[in-house]
Image: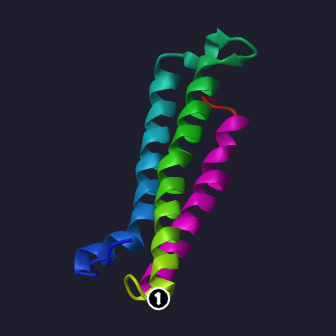
Amino acid sequence: MKRLDTDGRTVFLMLTAGFGAWSVIFVGLYSLLSVGCAFRWDAMPLGPWSLQRVVLVGAWLLSLLPIALMLALQYRLWTAAREGEGAVPMVVSAGAILTALALAATVWNFGMVTFLSTCR
């Protein structure tokens, strides 16, 4: 693995990318909820669930992918840094921990779309 450049932008991205993605996911899911309620997707059955539930759960599951990929990349950077090939291990460790917390927050906070009422 190539040496990681640890300029200010790289460090900033490593430390903020996970919760930055979390905030984008929050706005996206909230927007989908509002649009779905405005267009009465909750009243449109799609199998055993409503269109609203299918859209929200699908968007939530897809939203886990970018944060999980960020975490996998940061884990690779962390292992490279431990072997002396990359950036300062503390920065990489802190970034990976924050991204893992963002992934856990995404699962916990937004997993509620699977069972909570949508438009009431």
Question: Is 59 in the magenta?
Answer: no
- Residue that appears at 76% across and 15% down: 48
Q: Quadrant of the C terminus?
A: top right
| Other-residue count near label 1 (Cα within 10 Å), few / some / many at <14 / 14–19 / ≥20 | few
- Residue that appears at 52% across and 24% down: 37
Residue under numbered circle 1: 90
In this view, the residue in front, 53 or 14, is 14
Q: Picture coordinates of residue 70 (x, y %)? A: 46, 59
In this view, the residue in front, 6 or 20, is 6
The residue stretch that appears in magenta: 91-116
Horizontal placement of 43 versus 39: left or right? Answer: right
Q: Secondary structure at mark 1?
A: helix
- Residue that appears at 59% across and 39% down: 61
Q: Main secondary structure of the magenta part?
A: helix
Q: Picture coordinates of residue 63 (x, y %)? A: 51, 44
Q: Quadrant of the N terminus?
A: bottom left
Q: Quadrant of residue 20?
A: bottom left
Question: Is 109 in the magenta?
Answer: yes
Q: Picture coordinates of residue 66 (x, y %)? A: 47, 50
In this view, the residue in front, 111 or 91, is 91
Q: Picture coordinates of residue 12 (x, y %)? A: 31, 75
Q: Height in image: 104 above or below 25?
A: below
Give the image's coloring scheme: rainbow
Identify which amino acid the numbered label 1 is placed on.
Met
